[in-house]
């Protein structure tokens, strides 16, 4: 593959959405595993627990779950902005 073609292919990935690898984020409410998704392989709607709005198929978003044994069952799909601002909402405002 030529260098020009490689650059063009890389530029189609949304900025801020690397390959889907999990990372751990440290927040005041605990440690969370986070996976950034481009949405390109998603075929269904998800409901964001931060804003209670749909995340449509194909929309970039994140999946998060608690970083403790058994926390995998608590995976939730979030709009990226909602995830980053979830602690600013105050008590009882997040549906997670």
Image (cartoon, helix red, strand yellow):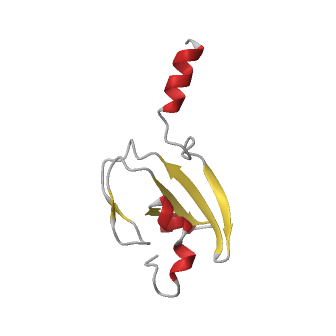
Q: Quadrant of residue 40?
A: top left
* Residue 43, x across and y down, in percent: 31, 47
Residue at figure coordinates x 45%, y 83% from the top left? 93
Q: Closest to the observer: 65 or 5?
A: 5
Q: Which residue reaches farthest bottom? A: 91
Residue at figure coordinates x 59%, y 15% from the top left? 3
* Residue 27, x across and y down, in percent: 66, 71
Residue at figure coordinates x 66%, y 74% from the top left? 30
From where the camera sits, is residue 59 visible? yes
Q: Is residue 14 left or right of residue 54?
A: right
Q: Closest to the observer: 76 or 72?
A: 76
Residue at figure coordinates x 52%, y 17% from the top left? 5
* Residue 1, x across and y down, in percent: 55, 12
Q: Closest to the observer: 89 or 65?
A: 89
- Where 2 falls versus 49 (above or below)? above
From where the camera sits, is residue 68 visible? no
Q: Is residue 47 left or right of residue 96?
A: left
* Residue 38, x across and y down, in percent: 45, 45
Q: Is residue 90 left or right of residue 95?
A: right
- Where 7 falls versus 59 (above or below)? above
């Amino acid at each position: 593959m030529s260098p020009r073609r490689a650059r063009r292919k890389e530029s189609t990935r949304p900025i801020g959405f690397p390959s889907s690898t999990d990372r751990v984020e440290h927040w005041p409410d605990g440690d969370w595993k986070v996976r950034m998704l481009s949405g390109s392989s998603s075929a269904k709607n998800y409901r964001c627990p931060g804003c209670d709005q749909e995340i449509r198929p194909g929309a970039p978003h994140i999946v998060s779950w608690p970083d403790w044994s058994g926390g995998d069952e608590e995976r939730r799909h979030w709009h990226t902005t909602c995830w980053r601002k979830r602690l600013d909402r105050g008590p009882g405002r997040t549906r997670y």
